[in-house]
Amino acid sequence: MQNFEFYNPTRIIFGKDRLDSIDKYVPADANVLITYGGGSAVKSGLIAKIKIVLGKRKVEEFGGIEPNPHFHTLMKAAEIVKKNKIDFILAVGGGSVIDGTKFICLAAHYEGDPEDLLKMGFRRITSDVVKKVVPFGTVLTLPATGSEMNSGAVISHNDGKYPVMSDLTFPVFSILDPTLSFTLPKIQVANGVVDAFVHTTEQYLTYPVGARLQDRFAEGILQTLIEIGETTVNEPDNYIVRTNLYWSATLALNGLIGAGVPQDWATHMIGHELTFLFGIDHAQTLAIILPALLEVRRKKKHAKLLQYAERVWNITTGTEDEKITKAISQTRGFFESLGIKTRLSEYGVKAEQLDNIVQHLKAHGLTALGEADDHNLETSREILEKAM
Amino acid sequence: MQNFEFYNPTRIIFGKDRLDSIDKYVPADANVLITYGGGSAVKSGLIAKIKIVLGKRKVEEFGGIEPNPHFHTLMKAAEIVKKNKIDFILAVGGGSVIDGTKFICLAAHYEGDPEDLLKMGFRRITSDVVKKVVPFGTVLTLPATGSEMNSGAVISHNDGKYPVMSDLTFPVFSILDPTLSFTLPKIQVANGVVDAFVHTTEQYLTYPVGARLQDRFAEGILQTLIEIGETTVNEPDNYIVRTNLYWSATLALNGLIGAGVPQDWATHMIGHELTFLFGIDHAQTLAIILPALLEVRRKKKHAKLLQYAERVWNITTGTEDEKITKAISQTRGFFESLGIKTRLSEYGVKAEQLDNIVQHLKAHGLTALGEADDHNLETSREILEKAM
């Protein structure tokens, strides 16, 4: 096991009918900004219910945070925060609204050029850089990204998608009521299953370091997602199954399974370019890239892929390589069983466009990916070719 | 899955050579009290190393916190806190030192009678009750109780052992350097394995509520402890194996596997009386009670015991009852493989003393235990008889 720090102060409030907790955990004298996305939270009456719980607090609203939230949108909200002396933000939505809100909290009182905050890469933004950060809570309506219990965000700007990391942007609390997701379109639920699945594999399918619990926990999340995936897509109001999707998505990216183990975020990095260039849903880009990446990197990842085949997919017969082949194939099959296509060509991407994707990876400095920084542009090209 | 709140703000600093973090996370102007136990942390040079890291901070020491830390001992430390205007405590030791330190932090500035703090049972002590709590960190030298990443404590007083629960007593940070435990006597390591194991079963062996992740995580901890138990007892300086014991013990009782599931702490409750009456080590009382309790309660716990047999012990043949019988037997065998005796008679307890144990349970109000409050004094008597 590698040395690690684990810190996660977000309070999770899980289950049915938990909105009353907002009154408990939002300061009684706060000026509150509610942030949300396309408006389904308004139409469903959720925002109205939340405003009732907020009672006499002064409340502003900022809607329209788009999927892959954009810098310019968020800066408009940051202006509202300053102008209205907002001292608590409540993000109501999925990963995009929550990621966007984290950036608003950092940018509102930042004394420098907010575009600088996009240029930190995976370095953590500290209180030396941003001296005043607005606290926030979340009401999660789409289980997928894990943003409700971590401090990271991905923000879109002119020329790409940028990670923003900071210990200052953990939600104070997150309300996880699975019933709030019952009305989601099937495809968004399927995307959520895939997103959580790939977050887990990116912290698990690397090389062994004797971290037995992290392995067992990752395998537990993967097994759970496999067990419930089709059901939770097809039976949206099956509460008990949906609770397991919610909790899986949160635990897949709250720092726990990644503590003390190598990580490989190449699937996400390549996927971000596909979203940016072709508008493919984030989770769908992961479903396209992961099986191809595992094929291309199967020698490097042999030991963990074998463990994955045996423990997650219960594949007990065949040679080691046969087991791995079968596990990768079943991974692809799992994504497809949820209604998610796993081939670039199925999304209309042509072979002659692969060059451009590789160029974008290069332009964004993504030339040494993987658990050992040995996944170069040629590796990415090979993966893209295999993903066609 | 049941509704739950999960909150755990303790920062874990894990691995070799992490003492430098103390300088980062203890306020630079703090007056520090270092608390410790019998003195091995002094003899090993650990306290001296910590004082070097603390640099120019004013440091007081309070040693001699005993196993099953006692109210009167801790009140002496609370006096030192007040007298020396201590504003940060560093607990160096195992669960007893850390539990004791939590009580010191609560009692030092409590305005009422500190004995009242023992009378809250499992109700959480809030800031309405204790207005000022001293913050503290820990340096863990004995992996067992999980106290390093939770806010609970068990304090001994005249007539028994008392749980003390509060959201105010999470360690600010805990340093988990497995090498600090290399010099422990074998029996203490074995006790640690058993303690972590039983913490896990008490949150797992109840009845199913469809909490798939909590089950998988609990099973992962149990499997890990079974895999590493004998090795970590017999190879004290096997670092990688010991890392897994450390992390297992912490995760067994940091709130995660117990979130949203029923719990049954009867093994601990009966065990506390055995420690109080006969001075049997805490973990040994658990090793005595658990197998007997599982036998007596096997009908109530049937579904989870079967899952335990199949998933944790990989028992695949036989009837359901045969599988459960085998799993309970293997549980006992596991404890014994670590050098821990599992029969009351092996600790010198006589059949005629069982009445007295039951009387103590009654006197402490422990008449409705178990996941459904249906474990009464007769159940406890039956368990004690089976444990002879």
Image (spheres, coloured by chain):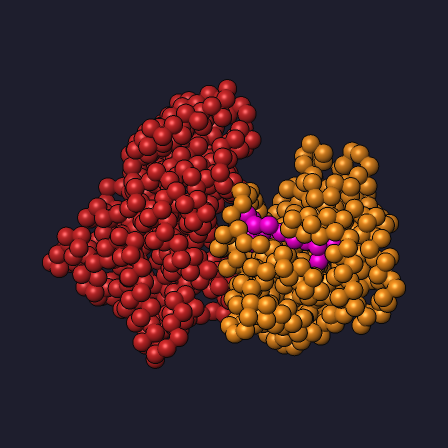
Chain colours: A orange, B red
Question: Residue B179 at x, y = what percent?
Answer: 42, 39
Residue B118 in view in this figure? no
Q: Main secondary structure of the magenta part?
A: loop
Which residue does the image show at 28% across and 62% down from the upper left? Answer: B332
Which residue does the image show at 34% across and 80% down from the upper left? Answer: B319
Give A161 or A181, whichever is nearer the viewer: A161
**Identity of the residue furthest to the bottom in this view:** B319
- Indicate the quadrant where residue A349 lies: bottom right
**Identity of the residue furthest to the right in this view:** A352
Answer with left or right where residue B335 lies relative to residue A218. Answer: left
- Indicate the quadrant where residue A336 lies: bottom right
* Number of callouts: 0
Question: Residue A296 at x, y = what percent?
Answer: 69, 61
Q: Is residue A265 above or below residue A79?
A: below
Answer with left or right where residue B71 lies relative to residue B171. Answer: left
Q: Quadrant of the C terminus of chain A?
A: bottom right
Residue B159 in view in this figure? yes
Answer with left or right where residue B107 lies relative to residue A206. Answer: left
**Identity of the residue furthest to the left in this view:** B352
Which residue does the image show at 80% across and 72% down from the upper left? Answer: A346
Question: Residue B351 at x, y = what percent?
Answer: 13, 59
Q: Which residues are magenta?
A: A254-270
Give A377 or A308, whichever is nearer the viewer: A377
Question: Residue B375 at x, y = what percent?
Answer: 30, 65
Residue A14 part of the magenta-drawn span: no
